[in-house]
Image (cartoon, rainbow, N blue to C red):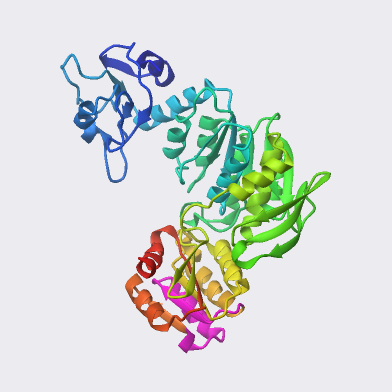
Amino acid sequence: MKVADCLKAIGGELVSGAGDKVFRGVSIDTRTLKEDELFVCIRGDRFDGHNFIEEARNKKAAAIVLSEKSNALSKNSEAPPVVRVGDTLKALQELSSFHRKQIPVRVVGITGTNGKSTTKEMIASITETKLKTVKTKGNLNNHIGLPLSLFHLSSDDKVAVLEMGMSAAGEIKRLAEIAQPEIGVLTNISEGHLVHLKTLKNVQAAKGELYDALSEQGTAIVNADDPLVLELAKSVRAKVVTYGIHSEADVKAGDIRPMNKEGFDFNVRLFDQTIPIRLPFLGACNIYNALAAMATGYSLGIGPDDMKTGLSNASLLSNRYETTEYQGATIINDAYNANPRSMHEALKTLANYKCEGRKFFILGDMLELGEMAESAHAKLGENITEHSIDYLVAVGELSAHAAKSAIASGMDKKQIATAAEHKCAVAFIKKHIRPGDCLLVKGSRGSKMEEVVRSLTV
């Protein structure tokens, strides 16, 4: 793209250099900036891109976009062109939206309280069997990450599978404005982001912004087993394709057979056909993710055999039901994130896991639950006693409420350990673990429970 085209997309003022200068990519980070890329100076919580303008010049950035509050201009005739705008974040978003509109790609937007990244990986693995696909890297799913993902689109791409995260109302709406999804996937709705949104009803409304963004020609992929998602689907303009296990649905799983360490076998009734599926992942929640992916694949014209191939080739991102070993014991690492619903799913996974020894639930704090933080952890403690768990190791101030509740609900104190730090939890585990045991490690992102796994496996 030429700098002059960039100006058309984002407005602003060319304060130095030539408009015919061409850039071949966009970056906000000088550590990964490549020669001839456009450098956009973003102000973040920890860094301000304006402080790295000289480094961007030294790395031969093709051009620089900065805010009108910055006077970091160069009189060197060989310096890259400089575009000045009022808001560099808005400029990044507008430029990515402009780029997306140049390419007739079919965009799949994915949101939900749980399962976004896994569903994204499964969908992309299915579409890649037939269509050139771009997907969100890792979990770059916010107001900065999604625009950066769109810049990876090229003229021969057919599908873009984009994860859309949020923590407040209006954020999904903005991401949808930028990406213009044709298909919207809402995995589920439960307690999360309550610090800003306060109530589950507000979470529902915020997630529903994805469905609201779909046109009459679009498709809403709807979890028929989630009442809050199903309620939203009643008012969408788009075509609706439902999926589920317990409720009647267009894409429905049945005859589910756990394969323990190897995942699940089940049959999927896809409208008028039945497809046998082998899903090589732990966690029954992943059956829902696979059904959402199949519903999306169907909507994009992918056939049953290619869907089976795509699911068998899919891979989970790190810290999501990853299995490893420590001294003959199995560790299930689901430490990426947590909320009440995903914790309950993790408990079921551990309880149903077949192992020769004992089962340890290594719990980190669930964060961003606002006023319900203590009660949610207390409820979790009750749930733990309802499952076949031999040891609870609670790490963190909030998790201590789960431990206290578990004791009050009848769990033996000798089966419970509380720890303020990861290293104390690791010491307890090393002292008590035996070959044949199984540990499941889970907590919110901020709890960094993957450090427990790392301490045991390095």
Left or right of residue 149, residue 47 in this image: left
Residue 95 seen by the camera: yes
Residue 232 seen by the camera: no
Which residue: 39% across, 71% down? 396
- Among all residues in the image, which is located at the extreme left? 75
Q: Is residue 415 above or below residue 446?
A: below
Left or right of residue 144, residue 35 in this image: left
Q: Position of residue 373 (x, y in %)?
A: 48, 66
Which residue: 46% across, 83% down? 416
Q: Position of residue 257 (x, y in %)?
A: 72, 64
State the residue in front, 304 or 69: 304
Q: Is residue 392 magenta?
A: yes
- Among all residues in the image, which is located at the extreme right? 272
Q: Is residue 389 magenta?
A: yes
Q: Is residue 426 above or below residue 128?
A: below
Q: Is residue 310 above or below residue 355?
A: above
Q: Position of residue 197 (x, y in %)?
A: 51, 52
Which residue: 35% across, 74% down? 420
Question: What is the magenta range?
Answer: 387-415
State the residue in front, 122 or 183: 122
Left or right of residue 33, residue 312 in this image: right
